[in-house]
Image: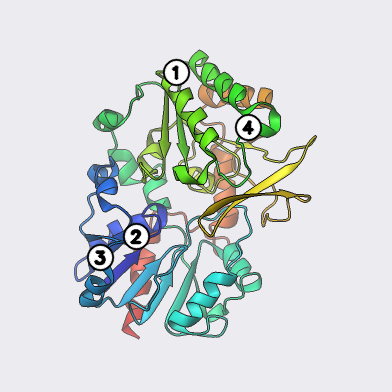
Amino acid sequence: MRICFWATSFQADNQALAVHLSRQPGVEVLVALDEPERYQAEPVARLLPLGARLLDRQAAATLREIAAFAPDCVIVDNHLPKRRLAKRLYVLWHGYGWRVDDLSTMKRELRKLVGDVQTPNADFRWQAFGELDRAYRVEHSGFAPDNMVTLGSAYSDLLLPSSPARLALDPRSVQDSYELDLSRPTILLGMTWHHGGALGHWGDDGVLHEELAQHAARLGANLLIRMHDRHRYATADAERMEALARRHAHVQLKFKSSHPDSLVDLLVSSVLVSNYSSLLNAFYYTGKPSIHIDPIARDGPNFRRDWRWGMLRTKRTQDPLSSWKLAPDDIGGLKVQSFAELESALVRAVAEPACCVESSRAFTSRHIALADGRTLADGRSCERIAAYLRRWLAE
């Protein structure tokens, strides 16, 4: 079985599955990703050695090399190659999340690559995280039920408390990859960029980030800030965050474009703070505290940011919930609606590391599960996916 991963972002589910498949007898894995040397420089390359060939997705020779590899299946996340690279195509979407996805462009591209995906198609499968996700993809996204498989999250295998990768990770072994002292609690700030300024709906974004850094210091904690690709932010916003990290020894800033992997960040962090990034869904598997910043401005305008045609575009929205598929209260942790509430929640999260165990478990029990209630967050998702791929590709 020869599997090619065409990875817009080689992390989370496609990363976990690629590592698993690369260790299986009779399986050859090739991964096409952007700047493979950046991935290989990340601490995850030591934690999870990948027995696969890596190609630069943007290199001119890559498509020819994939053709020579002759994969039985190409696994993609949220973007597709320009031409068909294998008979069969399998989608591992890049996160679960609260936001409605507009897949109209992707469905047009899928039709060109594998044919109609709104009717049964033997060459196409979309993997759902759970039964609720499957229903959403059929009813909202329009995929034929026969094209859906419900197998859980490969990433959960790496994040559950019983995960071998998590149990094997000694923070001292990755200390050289961090500017922070990992013997201290670490607050991970992982914000989605779609809502505009992360804290700006509560006041001056710069002032509040400075206060957040000082609050972390008072708690004896680090502040690890993970942002998306640097080009997705206004220059002033990116430079302000860089200046914040320079001012404080206990603050480190990472842009995805220069630090593409987030797994080790999740494993070494004590608590995650986010304004409803799908990073939260992954963090739930750890059982560690999560804090959800309500991104809706109650006393002012709401904005939405998107990346279209190579440009960052900001649009004012009258109904900020119109682009949400899950309710803001359907979460697995704490929710805050003011900066004062955020500070209080951080005090609790650092002092009570088990405060969100039950709520995070309840979320995954609702969403990462089959219709009969059986959980799919059981540490065997990669095994299930690999077994399905073998059966499907043998048909």
For the residues carrying marks 1 and 3, which lies nearer the camera in this image? 1
First in residue order: circle 3 vs circle 2: 2
For the residues carrying marks 4 and 3, which lies nearer the camera in this image? 4
Residue nearer the viewer, 198 or 282: 198
Query: The residue under label 2 is which amino acid type?
Result: Leu
Query: The residue under label 1 is which amino acid type?
Result: Arg
Query: The residue under label 3 is which amino acid type?
Result: Leu
Instruction: Using a 10 Å C-alpha cutoff, classify the residue at mark 3 as few (fewer than 14 neighbours), some (14 to 19) or many (20 or more).
Output: many
Q: Label 3, secondary structure: give it.
A: strand
Q: Label 4, secondary structure: give it.
A: loop
Circle 4 is placed at which residue position?
199
In three-dimensional space, the C-alpha distance between marks 3 and 2, rounded to whole angstroms, equals 12 Å
Circle 1 is placed at which residue position?
247
Circle 3 is placed at which residue position?
30
Q: Determine the residue positioned at 66% across, 48% down.
A: 304
In contact (CB < 8 Å): disc 3 and disc 2: no
Instruction: Using a 10 Å C-alpha cutoff, classify the residue at mark 2 as few (fewer than 14 neighbours), some (14 to 19) or many (20 or more).
Output: many
In contact (CB < 8 Å): disc 4 and disc 3: no
Q: Determine the residue positioned at 63% across, 22% down.
A: 344
